[in-house]
Image: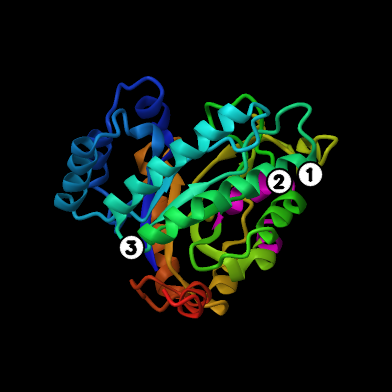
Amino acid sequence: MKISVFPKGDLEAIAVHRKMSVHDWIEKARALPVDGLELYSGMFWRTTDDFVDQVGEHLVSAGFEMPMLCASPDFTHPDPRRRAEEIDAEAELIRITARLGGPGASTRVLSGQRHPGVTREQGLEWAANAIESLLPLARELDVTLALENHYKDGRWEYPEFAQRADVFLELLDRIDDRAHFGVQYDPSNAIVAGDDSADFLDRVVDRVVTMQASDRRLTGDASLDDLRSSDGTLGYSPLLEHGVIGRGLNDYPRIFRTLRAAGYDGWISIEDGVNGMEELRLSVEFLHEAREKYFDGSTRVQVATHEAARKAAGV
């Protein structure tokens, strides 16, 4: 298992206000004992080959790999022109992933926003068709598209269309490819959706290709019942906050045992740092301890179910 980090606490400064660059983040991350950095589409203020190559060179000189590029395509937008633009933008990010991460690296895909008036069936059809249309490019460049059980991109107006587990699983089942398509598992997002994160993993573990590790904790006397909305989702609430991994609501011992039993020994990216670098460092330490305890200290990148699918597909 290799460990990477994602700058949750600095994301707005980088992608929204542009007070911090991706190069600043790479330098800041040098202080952490990790193997890679997970990047985000909003970090690429330019997408020219020169700019992308500069980022790649900086990653290499700092001793990092780039296992996944987080993207937030909106494939459920009711305007067909917007959906086509989202597909084109995702294709560009797949090319950037291949340029920075090489064969086997992942590009995140989402379903899109829960736009008012878009029915479940229509949204599922649009999202599945969009992902299918991108798979030939993913196969050509040997990039894996990773569908995340997400909540809401910071730039979005509405939550994730496939936030609920039943919708997510139906979208997943519509796409047969297992060699270049799988699940990006985030346990905290399962909690935000009102699900038990370990139970959710049991349902998707055979298709997990990447993982983000974060944790959420309740504040004050709040309970999950206090947070649930009428449709069974939680959303982001002031009663539910980020914290050091292993100190929140996720049952990480069970999660790690499930991953190990399924043959997952791949990347785990830490999504933390909202409360500063010290908490991020503590989360890194937690993952190091977990690697020793649950993965025998392995620093390989081997995902048994994904490798079997690739072999069966002749990759």
Q: Is residue 163 above or below residue 309?
A: above
Which one is in front, 241 or 78?
A: 78
Camera-nearest residue between 57 and 191: 57
Q: Which residue is mark 2?
A: 125
Q: Which residues are magenta?
A: 184-200
- Residue 81: x and y in percent read 57, 27
Q: Earlier in the sequence, mark 3 or mark 1?
A: 3
**Helix or strand or loop: what does disc 3 sit on?**
loop
Q: Secondary structure at mark 1?
A: helix
The answer to whether residue 192 is visible is yes
Q: Position of residue 22 (x, y in %)?
A: 28, 35
Circles 2 and 1: CB atoms closer than 8 Å? yes
Give the residue at mark 1: 121
Image quadrant of residue 48? Answer: top left
Residue 103 circle label: 3
Q: Is residue 46 above or below residue 1?
A: above
Closest to the observer, 44 or 214: 44
Q: Cα distance, mark 2 to mark 1?
A: 6 Å
Q: Quadrant of the C terminus?
A: bottom left
Q: Are marks 3 and 1 in contact (CB under 8 Å)?
A: no
Taking the image as shown, residue 20 lies to the left or right of residue 61, namely right
Q: Nearer the viewer, mark 3 or mark 2?
A: 2
**Other residues around mark 1 within 10 Å, as few (<14) / some (14–19) / many (≥20):** few
Residue type, mark 2 in image? Glu
Whether 267 is drawn above or below 62: the answer is below
Image quadrant where one finds the N terminus: bottom left
Relative horizontal placement of residue 39, taking residue 240 as reference (left or right): left
Residue at 41% from the left image edge and 69% from the top image edge: 291
